[in-house]
Amino acid sequence: MKKKILKILFKPLTFINRLIKKDEKLIFFYSNLGFRDNVKALYDYFIENNYNKRFQIVVSVNDYEKYEACAPENVTFISNKKGIGVFIKAKYAFYCFGKYPIKPSKKQVVVNLWHGTPLKKLGNMEQGCEKIDYHYFTKVLASSKMYKPIMAEIFGCSKEDVEVLGNPRNDEMFRKDKIKDASIRRGCNKMILWLPTYREYNDAFIISSLKMKDLQKLNEYLKGINCRMIIKFHPLQHVDTGDMKFSYIDLISQEELNRQEMTVYTLLRNADGLITDYSSVYFDYLLLDRPIAFAVEDMEQYRDKRGFIFENPREYMPGMEIKNRMDVEKFISDIFNHQDDYKEKRQKVNDIMNFYQDGNSAKRVAERFISE
């Protein structure tokens, strides 16, 4: 209901947006779920390559106060409320979480960077959402040619509006940072990353799946082989871990990751193996060609609650299925013993999901959309 009211209130701004002259030297970023993911990755590329010397960059984000005091030259951080006025003046606009329900002017380039390659149904593909208008952009990104018609169906646009350029956030997986990387691995032989996706029907799925007793036993196993495990919760998850403290298992939130000035992609590049479920992050991790395991025992429940893009999602899950602690230990043991039964399948799925398999997605987006 709130979104419907907002669309009605914003409707006159679409008309105003068509009339306002656009500033050819103004780049606008928007996010209503923190300054991160593809928006942050593309922004970082612009700063690293001195776009702020040639353009005015304005970042409208819900947590803008964290950044306004240390903004680089020609960069301003503002609230999403103030961002409305800047958006209608900007020649270039980028978003991946939320958006203003204002139709782009023909004088604008508004790019929906989105946040990953979906496995679950989204947008117009979701039951009851078929008639909702999500088309508030001139272009939307995709990671592969197979996803052009899928993204078009999700957002109610034509296939010509979908650009296969890759996800800028993935570029970080191809970099190195000795200080951050060392702090993540902490001298351990291996590091395993567990990334559960958000479940509306079970916020604490990972905790309920592995009981305290299992986690304690798993911690002892990890200690014996000097292997660290990081379980990083989805940004929308609010899990009370209470007194759950372990020497070789770290339970961390998005807020904690932000405080350490890291992203999930900092963790991914350091992970020797990934455990996940229906999160699109494993499509990204395929670029590193490392083992993946899937905790998908609630697949039918998830299918009923949310739904999948593919009839048989397991065809696109190149890894063993995790059902209990013993499976987790088997997965880790195989990594230590260089036993990789899914390498060939991983490479096949990677070729389907990632047209570009490098660390240059932000560069492609910048060169495709910004005119100098």
Image (cartoon, helix red, strand yellow):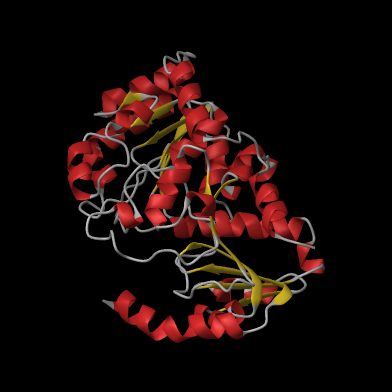
Foreground pick, 302 / 352: 352
Can residue 100 be seen here? The reply is yes
What's the residue at 26%, 50% (across, down)? 204
**Relative to 290, is 108 above or below?**
below
Foreground pick, 94 / 206: 94
**Relative to 316, is 95 above or below?**
below
What's the residue at 45%, 13% (across, down)? 339
For the N terminus, the quadrant is bottom left
Q: Position of residue 40 (x, y in %)?
A: 59, 59
What's the residue at 27%, 51% (across, down)? 199
**Relative to 331, is 154 above or below?**
below
**Relative to 127, is 109 above or below?**
below
For the C terminus, the quadrant is bottom right
Q: Would residue 94 be found to the left or right of residue 353 on screen?
A: right
Q: Would residue 255 be found to the left or right of residue 331 on screen?
A: right
Can residue 211 be seen here? The reply is no
User: Which quarter of the figure has residue 211?
Assistant: top left
Q: Position of residue 368 (x, y in %)?
A: 68, 53
What's the residue at 55%, 62% (across, down)? 138
